[in-house]
Image (cartoon, coloured by chain):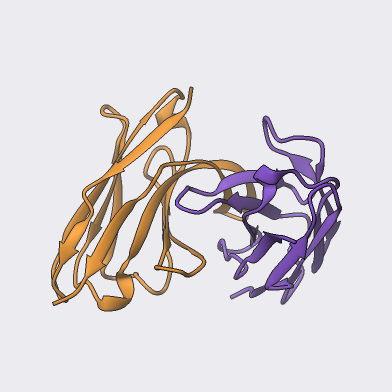
Chain colours: A orange, B purple
Amino acid sequence: EVQVLESGGGLVQPGGSLRLSCAASGFSFSGYAMNWVRQAPGKGLEWVSGITGDSTTIYYADSVKGRFTISRDNSKNTLYLQMNSLRAEDTAVYYCAKRGTYYKDGSNYYYNFDYWGLGTLVTVSS
Amino acid sequence: EIVMMQSPASLSVSPGERATLSCRASQSVSSNLAWYQQKRGQAPRLLIYGASTRATGIPVRFSGSGSGTDFTLTISSLQSEDFAVYYCQQYKSGGTFGQGTKLEIK
């Protein structure tokens, strides 16, 4: 059974940092791109970042580029999101999501998401 | 950026009736369109990908159609567990989501 479980959320002051983790099981982790998707309170879904299985290609939404860093450790079946220079608008539930099928455009891949974790809440507030 | 627009924002339907939800893209996404269901306090669940292919374990009452810019999710006979928020997502360029349609019990 595929499972993904996020951790590391919490309350942080504006300008602060936080590192999220996502532990995966039930599938060949290194063979799949993984992503972070967030949802602000009462709002819709926003894709944040993605990383291919071999970490050779990484994608970021413009809203987090330069502040967030995605990475993975395939030996630990774990995905990470390092979040720096946090802002109030980063407040959200952060979901870890396994890529489903994809569309290939040149060297870029774009994904849908077939398995999601329960999410971890990040609150940026003074 | 491709913008996804869903309509209506909310929809009231009686159990056993059909529900039709719409999603429109600001430019063609071909068939690179997915639908998700999200119940309160839960993670989203993939229902449909490739505009019309049901994901693993999804009941046949859920069907997707469309290509290019206009897409539809149809739930043929609503069950109590289907009342939730539904999102479309394009994955032709980036991964933008629609703002969601809330399906409520009438």
Q: Position of residue B87 (x, y in %)?
A: 63, 60
Q: Residue at x 30, y 57 (%)?
A: A121
Whether residue A98 is situated above or below residue A119 in the rendered picture:
above
Whether residue A98 is visible here, answered yes or no, is yes
Q: Residue at x 41, y 42 (%)?
A: A117
Check the image and report above or below for B86 versus A102: below
Can you say which quadrant of the picture contains the C terminus of chain A? Answer: bottom left
A105 relative to A15 in the view: left or right: right
Left/right placement of residue B72 relative to residue A75 reads: right
A110 relative to B23 in the view: left or right: left
* Front in this rendered view, residue A95 or A70: A95
Frontmost residue, A111 versus A53: A111
Asked if A70 appears above or below A100 in the picture, the reply is below
Residue displayed at 69% across by 70% down: B10
> Residue A61 lies in what quarter of the image?
bottom left
In the rendered image, the vertical position of residue B3 relative to residue B85, given as above or below: below
- Nearer the observer, B29 or A22: A22
* Horizontal and vertical percent position of residue A115: 51, 39
Please state the total of marks drawn on the protein image.
0
Q: Give percent across and percent down for residue B4.
A: 66, 71
- Residue A57 can be seen, yes or no: no
Q: Nearer the viewer, residue B74 or B84?
A: B84
Q: Which residue does the image show at 36% across and 55% down from the upper left?
A: A94
